Image (cartoon, helix red, strand yellow):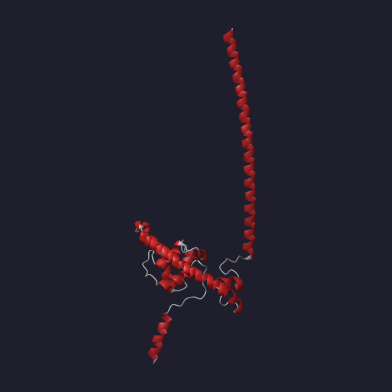
Amino acid sequence: MKYRFLSVGLVFGNCKKEISVRPARMSMDEYNQKNYDEWCKVGPKHKNFLNWKMSYVQNSNCRCPTFLERMFLFLEMAKWSEIFRISWGFRMCFLGIKEDWLGLDDEWMGTFEFLYKHIMAYVGLLGIVFVLCLYAVIAAPLGLLTGGYLWPREVKEYIFWGDMHAPKLSSDSKILKAEIDELKDQIKEQIKELKAHHKELKAQNKEQINELKKQMKQKLDAVAGKKSRFRVR
């Protein structure tokens, strides 16, 4: 009996639990080390998915997640802009193709097979986006009735707690930021004044050059007139 409880305790002690607080959504088309590290700490599934998705940066050989895992994790982690415009990363995730593998065979990207797969991925993802829009229309009124329970995570955070991922500035930081902004405005004004002064100097120099050219022409004309008189005599 003692060993049974001990084995159960070891099993549960070795299990890696996912953290409940989710970081800010990240771009799946661009690599950001800070966002990558934050999402890797959420759980082993998220870490494996990111290592597979961004293996061209991490140089890792992770197993390809299943289709449902890829879709759920992408929808959970990716920016909404990349989801609704069906970005390149979203299509590659739908097809289960690592982006570093494409770099090894660029000729395949121009084949009919590549075009066909991307068209099918686009059609399939349009269905997913349609379901998301339908869910948003249904969840909006139901969220009001359930106190926001059915709203997406970002909506609940913004309404009830504010932007949790925005950096909070202390009073000293705010004062310092205000001073920096004021200095920036002063520098911009000085740059404008310098540009205007430079323009005035340029115009004055142009006038002086034109005046000098005019005087030189008059002198040359006078010298030419004197030479012609000497020739006549």
Question: Which quadrant holds the N terminus?
Answer: bottom left
- Vertically, is 187 above or below 9? above
Task: Spot the residue most to the bottom.
Answer: 1
* Residue 189 seen in this snapshot: yes
Image location of residue 124, percent across then percent down: 44, 68
Given residues 141 and 26, the one toward you in this image is: 141
Residue 84 x %, y %: 51, 65
- Is residue 38 in view? no
Instruction: Give how far across and how far down residue 47 sits, in percent.
Output: 43, 70
Q: Quadrant of residue 116?
A: bottom left
Residue displayed at 60% across by 26% down: 213
Query: What's the residue at 39%, 91% (across, down)?
Result: 2
Q: Position of residue 132 (x, y in %)?
A: 51, 71
In the image, 96: left or right of 75? Answer: left
Name the one closer to the observer, 100 or 47.
Answer: 100
Along the horizontal axis of the image, is 149 left or right of 110? right
Quadrant location, the C terminus: top right
Say above or below: 211 vs 79. Answer: above
Outermost residue toward the top? Answer: 233
- Of residues 126 and 73, the one drawn nearer to the viewer in this rendering: 126
- Horizontal side, residue 143 vs residue 82: left or right: right
**Count of numbered badges drawn on the protein:** 0
Residue located at (43% from left, 83% from top): 12
- Corner quadrant of residue 89: bottom left
